[in-house]
Amino acid sequence: MRLRVRFSLVILSLILLSQVFFSAAYYYIERRSEMGLMYQQAMQSVQLATAECHEAMVTGDWGTAREYFVALGMLPAVRHADCMDAGGRILAHSDPTRIGERNLDAFGVAEGVWQVSRSVRLPGRGAGLARIGYDAAELDAQVRGRLARTMLVLSQVGVFSMVLGLLAAFLVARAQTRPIEELAAATAELSAGHLDFRLPEDARRDELGLLRLKFNEMAHRLGELDKMKRRLVESLTHDLKNPLAGIKASLQMMLDRNAGPLTAAQKKYMESSLESADRLWDTIDGILDAMRLQAGPFPIQLEDAEVEALVRPAAAGLEPKAERCGVKLKTSVPKGLPRVKADCELVQRVLGNLLANALKFTPSGGTVTLRAEKDGGTVRFEVRDTGAGIPAEELSRIFEPFYQVSETGSLAREHGSGLGLSICERIVREHGGRIWAESEFGKGSAFFFTLPAA
Ligand SMILES: Nc1ncnc2c1ncn2[C@@H]1O[C@H](COP(=O)(O)OP(=O)(O)OP(=O)(O)O)[C@@H](O)[C@H]1O
Ligand SMILES: [Mg+2]
C-alpha cells in the first residue's frame, strides 16, 4: 500500500475514533442531563399537586383540586395522581371514581411505575400525601426520542467533518509524502548510474529538508568518487596496457623466430605466455569497455544487417577454440529471417561473449548451439550449452558487473573478470532489445537476446 494512502488512512481513523469517543461521551452526558430535567419537572408537578391538596384541605373546597388531579392524569406519561389524608383515604384522584377509597400502602408502587410523592401537612391533622406515578417506559421513550434527535444532528455533523477530514488527510498526506517520493525517484536515478542527478533546492528546514540536503551532498560525493575511480582505472589500464603491448610484441617476435631458432619446450612456454598476455589484454579491454558503457550513452551505428552475417563470423571466431576444447559448435539460422537493426561490431561482440562463456563452462564432449529465430517483430538469438549450468537464484544477478557464480568458478576453463554479460546487457539494451538466461544447474544454460527486425 502506498505511503500516501497509509498516511491518509491513519489520519482518517484518528478522526473517526475521536468522533466515536466524542459522540459516546456526549450521549452519556446528554442522557444524564435529560434524566435530571425530568426529575426536576416531576418534583415541580408534585409540589404543585401538594399545594392544591393543602389548599383544599384548609378551605374544604375540593372542586379545583380534583380538576387539577384529573388534568394531571391526562398527561401522556402519568399513570396516576392522587392525594390522601393521614388515614390513607383518597381525597382527590386522576380517576375520580376512586375518591373515598382507602389506600393503606401509600408507598407501594406498581411494576413499571416511577412515583414521586410529597407529604401534605395540616397542623393538628397529621400528614397526608400527594403522589404522581409515571409510566417508566413512556418516560424512557421520551428521553430516547429527544436523544435520537440530538444524535441525528451529531451524525450529520460527523459526516460533514469526515468529508472535511478526508480532504485534510489527503492534503496533509500529500504534503508529507511528496518529498519522500521525490527522494525515492532521485535514489532510483542514482542507482541507474545518473550520478549527476540533484534534487532542486527546497526552503523547508525540517527533517525532510535536511534529508534532501544530505542526499544532494551524498550524490555529489558519489559523483566525485566515481570520477576518481574512473581516472584511476583509466590511468592504471593505460599503464598496464603499454608494457603489456611490449611483452606481447616481444613474445610474438621470438615465436616468429626473429631472435633465432626455438626448442620445442621454449616454443610451448612462449605460446602459453602469449596466451596469458592476450587474456590479460582482453580483461583490461573489458574493464575499459564496462566503464565506457557505464558512463552514459555511447555511439552505436545501426544498419540493416543480415542475421547470417552476424552469426557466421562470431561462430567462426570461436571455432578453433571449440575444437581445442573438444566441444561441438553448431549454428542454425533458418532461411528467410528478416534483417535486424544492429551495430554489427557490437552485436558480434555480444555473440562472441556468449559463445566464449558457453565454451568456458562446457566440458569436453559437450555441445554449444547458436540459433536465430523470428519472434514477432524481433529476431531472437540463442546460445545454448550442455555445461555447468547456473543456480536459479543467481540467474538474475549474472548480468551485474563483476558478478560470478562461485559454485561453478572451479569448473571454468579460464578465469574471467565477470564483466562480459554486463557489457552484453548494455549493448542489447542500447539496441532496444532484451537479454535473459535460462538454466538447469548441472545440465546446461541458454542465453537469449532479441534485436528489432529492420
Ligand atoms: N554459459 C554459462 N554457463 C555457466 N555459467 C555461466 C555461463 N555464462 C555466464 N556464466 C556465469 O556468469 C558469470 C558472469 O559471466 P560474465 O561473462 O559476465 O563474466 P566472466 O565470463 O566470468 O568474465 P569475462 O566475460 O569478463 O571474461 C560467469 O562468471 C559465470 O559464473
Ligand atoms: Mg564472459
Image (cartoon, rainbow, N blue to C red):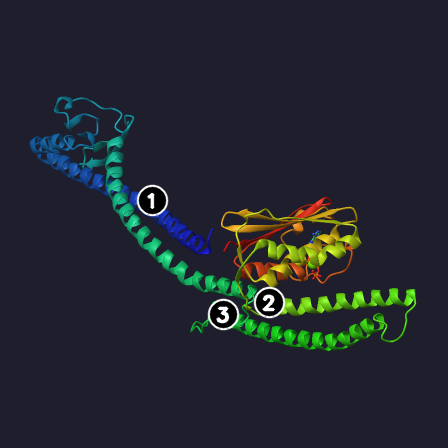
Does mark 2 have its CB less than 8 Å from ligand 1?
A: no
Which residue occupies the foreground of this view, 148 or 228?
Answer: 228
- Above or below residue 99? Residue 168 is below
Marks 1, 3: nearer the viewer? 3
Instruction: Please give the residue where the numbered disc 3 appears in the rendered image.
Output: 212
Disc 1: residue Cβ within 8 A of ligand 1's nearest atom: no
Query: Ligand 2 quadrant?
Result: bottom right
Location of residue 289 with respect to 380 vertically, above or below = below
Q: Examine the rendering and report whether any part of residue 406 can be seen.
A: no
Among numbered discs 1 and 3, the one appearing first in the sequence:
1
Q: Earlier in the sequence, mark 3 or mark 2?
A: 3
Residue 190 appears in the picture as rendered? yes
What amino acid type is highlighted by mark number 3?
Arg
The local crowd at label 2, few if under 14, some if 14 to 19, many if 20 or more residues have their Cα within 10 Å, is some
User: Where residue 28 is drawn, which disc sits there?
Assistant: 1
Q: x, y (%) of residue 117?
A: 24, 35
Please give the name of the residue rendered at 40% of the width and 63% of the height, measured from the top-left corner.
175
Q: Position of residue 238 (x, y in %)?
A: 70, 76
- Residue at 19%, 37% (x, y): give it: 46
Question: Who comes first in sequence, dot 2 or dot 1?
Answer: 1
Residue 321 picture location, percent across and down: 76, 56
Crowding around mark 1 (Cα neighbors within 10 Å: few <14, some 14 to 19, many 20+) is few
Q: In whole angstroms, how far apart are the C-alphas of marks 1 and 3? A: 50 Å
Looking at the rendered structure, the secondary structure element under dot 3 is: helix
Q: Circle 2 is placed at which residue position?
A: 293
Mark 1: which amino acid? Tyr
Query: What's the amino acid at mark 2?
Result: Leu
Considering the numbered disc 1 on the image, is that residue within a helix, a strand or a loop? helix
Q: Nearer the viewer, mark 2 or mark 1?
A: 2
Q: Is residue 32 left or right of residue 356?
A: left
